[in-house]
Structures are given as structure tokens and as C-alpha cells.
Amino acid sequence: MGEQKNMHPQQFLELSKLSVEGLFYVIKDNEKELRDCYAEILLFFYNFSLIISSQVLMHVIVSYNKNSKPKKLKNQNKKKILNS
């Protein structure tokens, strides 16, 4: 896990072709704009994660129901359930 935490920033710097100092100055020069959109981005990702989570949950429920075999009920239990 620690290796991945170090790998992602390194990959970002390689892809952006910036040094750490260069990235620092980009952030510093655009600090106000970055802070202004930060809250909007968090709200977007929060909503997006809720949508994805609900889709995953629905997929699990549907898959479980398709793969599970119904339990055989005794005649007495069938009557109780049907009469409820």
C-alpha cells in the first residue's frame, strides 16, 4: 500500500512533465481558482460515488437472487406465509 501511495504522485509528475517545484508553482499561482472549485468537485464525487454504490448494491442483490435457490418450505410454513 505504501508503494502505491508513492507511485501515484510519481506517475502524475511524469505524465504532467512537471517537477515537484514546478507543480508547487502551478498550484500556488492558481490557488484561488483551485480552492473555489474544490467544494464543487467534492460534491460531484460524493454524488457520483452514491450513484455507483447504489448500482453495485443493486447488481449484488440481483445476482444473489438469481443464483440463490429458494428454500423448500414445509406445508405448515407455506400456509402461514400465504395467510400473512
Image: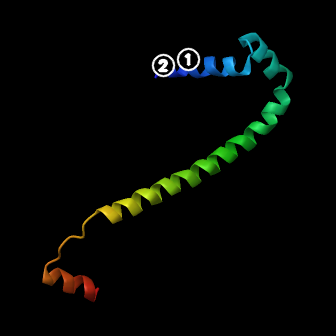
Q: Secondary structure at mark 2?
A: helix
User: How many angstroms separate mark 1 from mark 2 (CA)?
Assistant: 7 Å
At a point 24% along the width and 70% down the height, the residue shown is: 70
Q: Which mark is residue 60?
A: none
x and y percent of residue 79 in the render? Answer: 20, 86
Q: Residue furthest bottom?
A: 83
Residue 52 percent coordinates (x, y): 55, 51
Res. 25 image quadrant: top right
Label 1 secondary element: helix
Query: Which quadrant is home to the C terminus?
Result: bottom left
Task: Please tell me which residue is depicted at 52% across the width and 56% down the height of the picture.
Answer: 54
Going by the numbered disc 1, the residue's amino acid type is Asn
Lateral position of residue 19 relative to residue 46, left or right: right
Q: Is residue 75 above or below residue 7?
A: below
Mark 2 = which residue?
2
Where is residue 15? Give x, y as percent. Answer: 69, 21
Q: Quadrant of residue 42?
A: top right
User: Measured along the vertical axis of the image, is residue 43 above or below residue 82?
Assistant: above
Q: Nearer the viewer, residue 28 or 66?
A: 66
Q: What is the three-letter code of the residue carrying label 2?
A: Gly
Instruction: Tell which of 18 and 84 is nearer to you.
Output: 18
Q: Up-down: is 43 above or below 3?
A: below
- In the displayed structure, would residue 81 be above or below residue 70? below
The residue pinned by badge 1 equals 6
Quick check: marks 1 and 2 in contact, CB under 8 Å? yes
